[in-house]
Image (cartoon, rainbow, N blue to C red):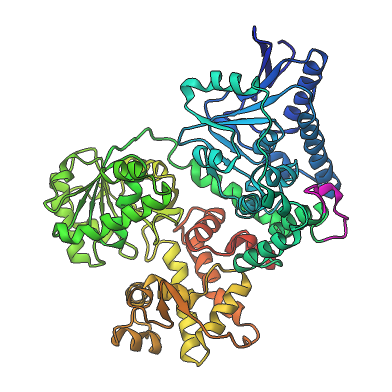
Amino acid sequence: MQGFKHWQIKRDSDGLAWVTLDVAGASANTLGREVLEEFSTVLDTLDREPPKGAVIRSGKSAGFIAGANIEEFTKLANPAEARAMVRRGWDLFSRLAAVKYPTLALIRGHCMGGGLELSLACRYRIAIDEPGTKLALPEVMLGIVPGWGGMLRLPQVVGPAAALDMMLTGKNIDAKRAKKMGLADECVSARVMDNAARMVVLSGRSPRGLPFVQSLMNGPLKSVVANGARKQVAQRARREHYPAPYAIIEIWEKYGGNALNVPSDSPASLDAIFGSATTKNLVRVFFLQDRLKAFGKDSDFAPKHVHIIGAGVMGGDIAAVCALRGMTVSLQDQSVEKIAPAVKRAAELYAKRFRGDRKQVRFTLDRIVADPQGAGLAQADVIIEAIFENLAAKQALFKDVEVRAKADAVIATNTSSLKLEDIGAVLQNPGRLVGIHFFNPVPKMPLVEVVTANNTDQNAARKATAFVRKLDKLPLPVKSAPGFLVNAVLGPYLLEAMRCIDEGLPPETIDEAALAFGMPMGPIELADTVGLDIAMAAGKSLAGDVEPPRKLTALIQAGHFGKKSTQGFYSWENGRPHKGPAAQAPAGLADRLIKPLLDATQRCVTEGVVGDADLADAGVIFGTGFAPFTGGPMNYLQRRA
């Protein structure tokens, strides 16, 4: 039908209307003001001549709908404009939910935020069974709430417990999971999706209802569910730092999921949420993440075979992540027995990721080949060294790698503290060597530093960056310098915390001060988790002749390395530290702990280790978990000044 810029309506002989969203001039569909206003006109058109059913689908290969237009969100001048934006989506999707003819959202690819809220306003949903199909309400990650009906309809569709879990974490759901939990009516392959959509939308079947107990949780037992959710949120996020999750619970519990009903003086109101510094900073973090995702786009490098030397925790987990992304991995160490624990950890990771689907676990695990002789090195597109931090050992290894590797293979080290110039000094062509520095635990940590020296071949760096993006990680370009960015800022932070220990402060008090500031984990627990021996080695590399903390030295001499040995600053059981109650922290303790981190970040920017202040903020947030609500250490310094 003519007259639409972003939408198309095509009627078929069955009386179905196929409504296609293809936002003009954009690679992905987002729901900006113009798109929503045009959708209102689409509904006017369908109202004048109601179809037997309407199927809403995407005209983009990139996915269904990526959510609201975040660029428009950043231009809101005041809470009144924010309220108008929420009302626009709320009223429009309420209208969609009330149409007389059956409606169906045909979801292929990402279906995020406002896209999922639109699909929830449809009578039916079909999710296409492909890896790229992900459904989520991630607004909480931006410090806002799902204001276009998600807080009302998602609990009605999947039950309040599952709905709150999705809304309070922002986590995404794949197609199979969506079908299992009732978010999707069907999960089908792309080959049959149009026929499936036709059958379902014309079936006349009633939408899935909730079991009796679930319906009680949406009614008389609401407060019980809400109180439980608040307790869970409180374990992860403090209200003063992250008001949005608490607002979501309150809006669902007390205001029928309609944010427009919340009084403006309430902490859960749109005025409070959109006016908060947290929201501004989390939106900033969203754009920082997008900037990191853009690195590597200038290369078409698509590695199929990765060879990893060193099957310890880091090397083994890098192998597991590569295989998870469809790459063949040859994993080299001194013997099959040394490689076996890495394969076992990979199997455990895949069992969680694939929710016990043994066939998927087996297929993915088959991509990891134990290779004690290193036969796979000669065929590999990417070669990563992940052995212990010893310069002579790494130099000897790379002399051999350079001779055996393909001429166009990426040759990389996962070193955390040694300079590329030193490692590559023995190579005939040192420009081939790049750093690809992962963080522990590799499957969870999103950031990977891509390290270059002054003599690094730029094509090698581009290929390394593209490889990181193929793993769905965030590449951060950094210069070769002691500790690069992340370890260079973490080292002084951990050192200051351990000096506090030597002064007699309990570890619980130190960690609590950092948590109160907004760090995801206290520095003492972090040191125990990383490994005290690793922390000591990195500290010596970074700090040079500085005397190491006395307590740290004593623990290492006693063979206590933290979590991995079940004893460090804390004793550990089943992967958890035993902590006593935290005493009242001395005034200014949090500022004392954070100051060395802030100073080190500023120094890395000044010395050009990282490109600019924004990239430094991105690296420290995604590499250390530094309080995202602050917008990053450089942003925090600027705002505090």
Q: Is residue 256 magenta?
A: yes
Q: Which residues are magenta?
A: 255-266
Is residue 379 placed above or below 418 in the rendered structure? above
Q: Is residue 157 magenta?
A: no
Give the quarter of the figure containing the C terminus: bottom right
**Towards the viewer: 445 or 358:** 358
Question: Which residue corresponds to the image point at 58% horizontal and 85% vertical from the top-left?
Answer: 582
**Towards the viewer: 402 or 245:** 245
Identity of the residue furthest to the front in this view: 212
Task: Decide if residue 260 is on the left or right side of residue 633.
Answer: right
Identity of the residue furthest to the top in this view: 13
Give the quarter of the figure containing the N terminus: top right
Q: Quadrant of residue 424?
A: bottom left
Task: Decide if residue 552 is on the left or right side of residue 77.
Answer: left
Is residue 504 placed above or below 142 in the rendered structure? below
Task: Decide if residue 229 is on the left or right side of residue 484.
Answer: right
Identity of the residue furthest to the bottom in this view: 504
